[in-house]
Image (tube, helix red, strand yellow):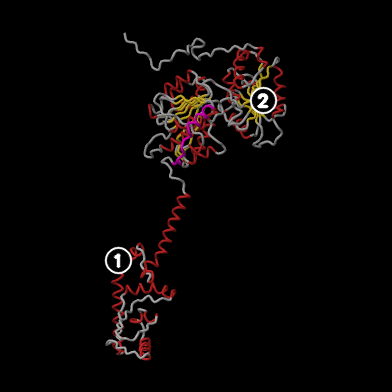
Amino acid sequence: MTVDLHTPTTKEKKEKKSKKPKEKRNGEDAGGGVYVRASHCYPTVLKAGTTDEVTAEKKSKKDKKKKKDKAAEDGMAVDPPADPTDDPIEEKKSKKKRKREAAEEDVAEDAGSSKKEKKKRKKEVESTPSDDAAAEPSTSESKQPREKKDKKDKKSKKDKKAKDAPSDPSPSGSVTPPAPSSSSDVEAFLQKNEITLTIPDGGAVVTPILSFSQLDVHPKLRAAFDGFKEPTPIQACSWPPSLEGRDVVGIAETGSGKTLAFGLPLLARLLASPLDKKAKGTTVSALVMAPTRELAIQTHETLEKLGEPFGIASVAVYGGVDKGPQIKALKNMNKGGMTTRIVVGTPGRILDLANEGACDLSRVSYLVLDEADRMLDKGFENDIRNIIGRTVGGSERQTLMFSATWPDAVRRLAATFQRDPVRVTVGSDDLTANSRVEQVVEVFDEPREKDSRLLGHLRTLIPRKPKGSEAETRILVFALYKKEAQRVEGMLKSKGFSVGGLHGDMSQSARLEALQNFKTGTTGLLVATDVAARGLDIPNVAAVINYTFPLTIEDYIHRIGRTGRGGKSGKSITFFTGEAHERALAGELARVLRESGFEAEGLRKFPMTIKKKTHSAYGAFFRDDIPTPKAPTKITF
């Protein structure tokens, strides 16, 4: 029998090493690096250990002697080929030579065939294993489970990141909103809230936003809705066109959330159009005008809170205080990481600062007229027109007007400065009282009984609770004249009530202090003139008492609108004597009560006639049935 020993290559060595653990586990002989050709009739028995590739190269002389002895014991005639290893000296030389050749082969194999081995492994992983491969697993197969596990781990990590991360934001940083409400839901919403949408010819249809989740704004702006269940009617219908950049006219009752109705699109527009840092000049891009100082301050505080997370600041400018700090605030527009992009103020002070060059309105592209009807009633129409003329003109400016009524003066202003506005009317174009406010009218035969009746109501309405608590009830008492307000305030203080005052004879700092104390609950009772009747959002006002009836029915509606705000209910008590101007307003007051579902039998002793509304310039002879021309008529002779 002749036995040929074949020296395995380096590649076979690597494969043999990877297969060795499995061979030991399964106890199988997988063949390997020693190939035996038997030419004798006697069977040759090879143990698993003797077939290892190290037998031919690395086993010592002792192993070979054992092999020869074993073959001799079995009586086998083995004729090995002439091997130089029989001589000890030659054996050492040949051993060194084999090691040197093996090292050279390792370097060559590693450098040249690494890519081929990778390709071969990849093919072996992808291909279906044959019977030989099942019995003789290769290196690529031993790595296959590990590669699959690594891929699986990477995939699970990616899935986890995708799950934890929010959906891809839009360029404005907003989250993609869900689909808009169905047409049936929209119709039911409009009918329930008595909303009228007037869309200009060729304008896109407006779909109200019935839930905050449908609003496509920056996530940080959603903090403004904390504590609210759903948008108010004026917000739901004015947000879609405002966010699209269209002009809007909003007509709604007091306490309907008009500040956020224009404040949210204002911030969204500023975020969508960041400032060019290289450009020089003013950074003011938005202007909000309000009729009273208190309303301007309130709006400024709301917008400043909304813009704070984005580094957008607001400046309030109003009369009654020194111009210096306001001018300084307008000049220091980029300090403390905040950029002044919003100006809120009253028309008189805004125009004053603009004429002095302290307030540059040349880049204002977002304009809001809040309580527009009130500003026109106070004679600010010329100032408003002058201010608007200083802003960006044409289609680049977005103009929003919010009002409680839709008189002719407001219509003319809208026709002059707005481009095809969408008009949202909640209720009717005429002023309507808040339906959540219970209205009580007490008719007096003797006006001197007012003080005792007032004290009786206050003792009933004000519960005994610790001062400063949020649940403390606030009562707002309205007087007609400043001197009357001072007298009533003094009378209540003498009776032991903690009371504040708010009227035109007070300094601006004293007015702000009195209003702040009333808002925080430090004083639960405030006596004020009609300066506090418009737009002020004071929390937890349980009741409004009209000590003296106002000069107009519109002022009455605004007064009682200080309670029942934000969806809450409220109560109003009105003292009516029928003296002076009151007698002529009895008919209109009775109409307002009927429309709200209340009756006042005591008013029937006064004439129920309703006086025709007069124009501020033309009086009772103004013809409102003739359309006002938009432009002057050119006459050619």
Which residue is depicted at the point 46% across and 48% down?
A: 165
Q: Residue furthest left?
A: 82
- Classify the position of the N terminus by image quarter: bottom left
Amino acid tagged 2? Glu
Dot 1 corresponds to which residue? 116
Q: Looking at the figure, which quarter contains the C terminus? A: top left
Q: Is residue 418 left or right of residue 504?
A: left
Marks 2/1 in contact by CB < 8 Å: the verdict is no
Q: Quadrant of residue 455?
A: top right
Residue 431 visible from this viewpoint: yes
Q: In the visual, does 632 lie left or right of 611?
A: left
Question: How far across and down, in percent of the image, does residue 163 sit?
Answer: 47, 50
Q: Is residue 292 visible?
A: no
What label sits on residue 489 in the rendered view?
2
User: Which is nearer the eye, 183 or 607?
Assistant: 183
Q: Residues within 10 Å of mark 2 (few under 14, many from 20)?
A: many
- Looking at the image, is 493 positioned above or below residue 171? above
Residue 65 falls in image quadrant: bottom left
State the image coordinates of residue 502 (x, y, percent, origin top left): 61, 26
Name the element at disc 1.
Answer: helix
Sequence-wise, the earlier of marks 2 and 1 is 1
Q: How many marks?
A: 2
In front here: 476 or 181? 181
Type of amino acid under label 1:
Lys
**What's the distance in space between the residues labelled 2 and 1, CA to CA?**
99 Å
